[in-house]
Image: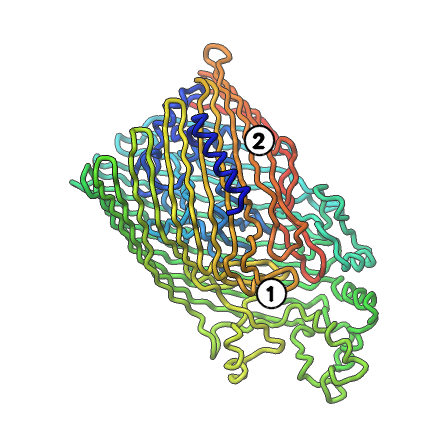
Amino acid sequence: MNNNNSKMFTHSLLAFAVMGVLGSTAYAEEQPTKQKNADDIERIVVTASKREKGLQESPVAITVVSSKAIEQAKVMDITDLQTLVPTLRVTPLQRSTNTNFSIRGFGNGTNNTGIEPSVGVFIDGVYRSRAASQIGDLPRLQQIEVLSGPQSTLFGKNASAGVISVTTREPAYYQQGKIEVGVGNFNQKEIKGYYTNGITDNLAFSVSGGVNTRDGFTESVVGLDDINDRDRWNIRGQALYEPTEDVKLRLIADYSKIEEACCSVENSINGPTTAAVRALGGMDLDETGSFAYQSTLNSDPDNNVKDSGVSLQLDVDFDGYSFTSISALRTNDSDFMNDVDYTSLDILNEGGYTDIETMTQEFRLTSTGDRVVEWMFGAFIFHEEVTTGDTLFYGNDIRNYFDVLMAAGGAPGLLGGVEGAYGLDPGTFFSNDTAVSSEFDQQNDAYSLFASFDYHISDEFTAIFGVSYTNDQKEITISQNHNDVLSALDLDTVPTLYGVPIGSIPQLAPAVPVIESLQFLPPMLGLPNAVENNKSDDSKTTWSLRLSYEITDNVNIFATAATGFKATSWNLSRYSSPFASDQSALETAGISLPNQVYGGRYASPEEAMVYELGIKTQFEHGSFSATIFDQTIEGFQSSIFIGTGYVLANAGKQSTQGLEFDSNYNLTEDWSLTLAGTFLDPVYDSFVGASGLDGPVDLSGEKPAGIHEVSITAGIVYNFEVFNGADGYVRTDYIFESDVKLAENTPESLTREVNSFNASTGLAFDNGVSLQLWVRNLTNDEYLLSAFPPPIQAGSFNGYPNQPRTFGANISYQF
């Protein structure tokens, strides 16, 4: 850890010790606007550890965000949640269907469907396996819990970096409801509501839903629709049945739909190929116009998502223990069409789809009552079928684009000359009927057996041991239809009309390296085949040991050692290729393709290890918690977009030392302050063969891109009474993220730093009417979410700009 970070850690701890700035970013209950905040802190109960425990007593690095904080801060979805939780980073990428979650800088999951996330997302105990099923507008919440560090001993799949657990409210046995209408800039319109009531003394139901639309904030300068709009709706129904005081069944069914034009990019760096675009009459935004929120795409991006599911939870209390079963079936279907050259020319377009069907089942037996050793035994079963495919279409301008590039390089007519040498018709290379279609199927079966024991050594001292055994099996099928004639042409072996390869022709031999550079999309060898195995079977036992000591009623300390595991991830993109170790066998079998690329089909499992020391304190006017940690992931699964596909690799070892803190201080009954932060010192201990700016590089000893070393969130809330029957509040939140390079394969000049403010104010009347004014990104802070090299445009780099200032007003009626 560098000296600057060490000093910041020390100063932060000393400041809080002196000031008594204590607390949490959350209240666990939805309360009237004006509250004694100390009472709210008393009521925080966490459930993500699968036992209800007070936040103060839970020996886990956890941040809890309440429905009240989410409503006041106008957090619409999990993407917005990072403005309240500094250890969480949420990065939207190329499409609405994919978002990358990371905790403490660890996390992956991209537009490549095969890359499962390292951060597990659970909604009412049901695992959501892909980002596409996680990004809809949040339902009627109770609270959100963000658990830092490996959680594999309690969560059955993909929790090697952490967990986001979303808990919604159960139906009530009395009539209750709310309807809310909102408007905002960019023509935003929002309506949502819920209703709950009892049908009988032991049967209740609820229904909720919403519609959220908004025009795009990125203007098309070529006369098409605005981009980055919002058009989504959802509906959710629940039934709660309690036939006896010991039996409870909760049935949940939901459906949501997204139809959006996403996502726009800016020209962060215009490379030399930009001149070719302009020479053909194309419009290309100048890089000095960053954050002009303009687009030159020659077709509207189209993103559609349908997500639905049903779950049934059964809880039965017996004498001395309880039984829980959570069964779920989910489907997620998405499709897209994008202009992926990101210019006004018709060069490359991509369309695709992903269909996911998931079944999960969890069983738990949990001890109840006071006992020296509390225990829990459980099993998690997972089955998923993924079908995904994409097609890269060559546009009307792609041949002219390459002809201009060749002429600018001193080789006019080169493509035509090569076509003639092979006896091909003029215009064969890069014709507008060229398309490369790839299809992928993945079947995944997994199960986990887990147990946890809380041994109360004394009234103050508790040891918690957890263990889990996980088995994960995948079977993959890959196929491709490929008619890019040039990319499939083996220049070294295929003879020309002259009877020899083109490299043997003196007039054309010097041009061979140039021609090879245009073979950017060679054929992909399918799976299964005679040499390569299309299956993976991974097993691992993970464990955790947590020691908790209650120094006083208000001060708890804890220590943790825990391991985590994530199974093999397969590369389900057009850059899936055999390992170099299979080259000889493939050639011997005669199935190696022309211009065969070697790289890798999958990333091997990643294994995490963390050591933590933490403290949780609670005082009359607030609370404070802090955790220092040393976290390592062996074989971290890294996926990097290189323009036309994804390169997937294992980092040998990535480690992070750091500190998290979370605090709340109630100055008075009306004023409350929150301050939370994360300080990280990340490094690739070893990563040979990473995807760098100019090809494979050794990043060993380097800092990973995209991980902010310092992240801070701060908030202040003022509650006030306007007159009898009307309470109000004013809230402002600030988020800071230190400067960091955006991606491993982009220049050092492309960085991200966040300094953003959000604010809101509201009034609540006794008659159930509430008013709210809100603004997000108040100061119109500008930063890039991520960056990448666009396809076949060497030296150019595009970036995804953040959302500009948005504001609006809401009125609601609660009864």
Q: Position of residue 700 (x, y in %)?
A: 54, 60
- Residue 631 to residue 599: above or below: above
At horizontal 62% and vertical 67% (from top left) the residue drawn is: 436
Q: Amino acid at mark 1?
A: Pro
Is residue 77 at all visible to an observer of this figure?
no
Q: Secondary structure at mark 1?
A: strand
Label 2 or label 1, whichever comes before in sequence order:
1
- Compared across the picture, whether 282 is left or right of 448 comes to right
- Compared across the picture, whether 698 is left or right of 28 comes to right
Outermost residue on the top side: it is 724
Residue topped by disc 2:
758
Residue topped by disc 1:
696
- Compared across the picture, whether 410 is left or right of 322 comes to right
Q: Estimate how packed mark 2 is, as few (under 14), some (14 to 19) or many (20 or more) residues with alpha carbons within 10 Å.
A: many
At horizontal 57% and vertical 65% (from top left) the residue drawn is: 574
- Residue 682 to residue 514: above or below: above
Work out how far the residue at label 2 is from the one at label 1, CA to CA, in angstroms: 41 Å
Q: Amino acid at mark 2?
A: Asn
- Residue 735 to residue 513: above or below: above
Q: What's the mark number on residue 457? A: none
Q: Position of residue 128 (x, y in %)?
A: 43, 49
At horizontal 41% and vertical 60% (from top left) the residue drawn is: 567
